[in-house]
Amino acid sequence: SFLHHNWGNANIFTEECRLLFPVHHAFALLQFEKEGIARKLIHQLKYNHRADVGALLAGWVTERLHFKNDIPSRIVTVPLHPKKEKLRGYNQLHTFANSLSGHYKIPCDHNLLKRNFHKKAQAKKKREQRSVRQDLFSCTQKVSGEHILLIDDVFTTGNTLSTIAWKILELGKNKISVLVMALD
């Protein structure tokens, strides 16, 4: 089911993120439920090479998310390890992010972040087993004074986005906002 979070207004997702890192804004499109539409769509996107689902979800975001003044300067996706990307054939977030980039006229940067290790997918772990090594991700360039919109598919514990956000925040006076397809 769709979540009704407004950009710029406090919402439960923003508050959840703020427990982990200083987030500027946070937006989640769908509620991730065991037998729900979000799970089915994201599964199609990730495992069945249905890149069109990324464009569909991005279209739903653009119908609901309207930036007023505080527009991010760059869209950044959570990277896959090159082995996993080769195995999967693509990064499922790229079609989604590129569609958003085209609509909002915000540049998309798929290369700012690098995943340093190949490890078991968070989705295959139980909630209490999910943790992220602090050195799992690195930044490939120095960015400062930017408003970065981090994009991921599903927010469960927030460990992945938190680790990445802190990496970017350490680089300089950056602001972090988050957009996810679904909130678990």
Image: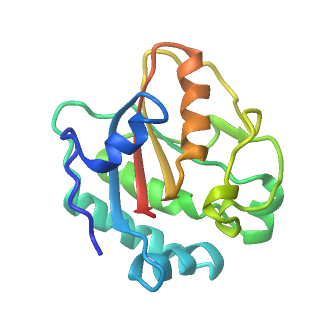
Q: Please name the residue shown 28% across and 34% down the image.
A: 71
* Quadrant in the picture for the N terminus: bottom left
Q: Nearer the viewer, residue 162 or 118?
A: 162
Please provide percent x and percent y for residue 14: 33, 42
* Quadrant in the picture for the C terminus: bottom left
Please provide percent x and percent y for residue 22: 42, 27
Residue 145, placed above or below residue 88: above
Residue found at the far front of this picture = 128
Q: Please name the residue shown 67% across and 60% down the image.
A: 122
Q: Nearer the viewer, residue 37 or 109?
A: 37
Label total for image: 0
Res. 123 image quadrant: bottom right
Residue 135, placed above or below residue 53: above
In the picture, measured across the screen, residue 133 lies left or right of residue 61, that is right
Res. 141 image quadrant: top right
Q: Please name the residue shown 54% across and 52% down the image.
A: 157
Report the coloring of the rendering: rainbow
Res. 100 image quadrant: bottom left
Please provide percent x and percent y for residue 33: 43, 76
Q: Please name the residue shown 53% across and 47% down the image.
A: 158
In the picture, measured across the screen, residue 120 lies left or right of residue 68, that is right
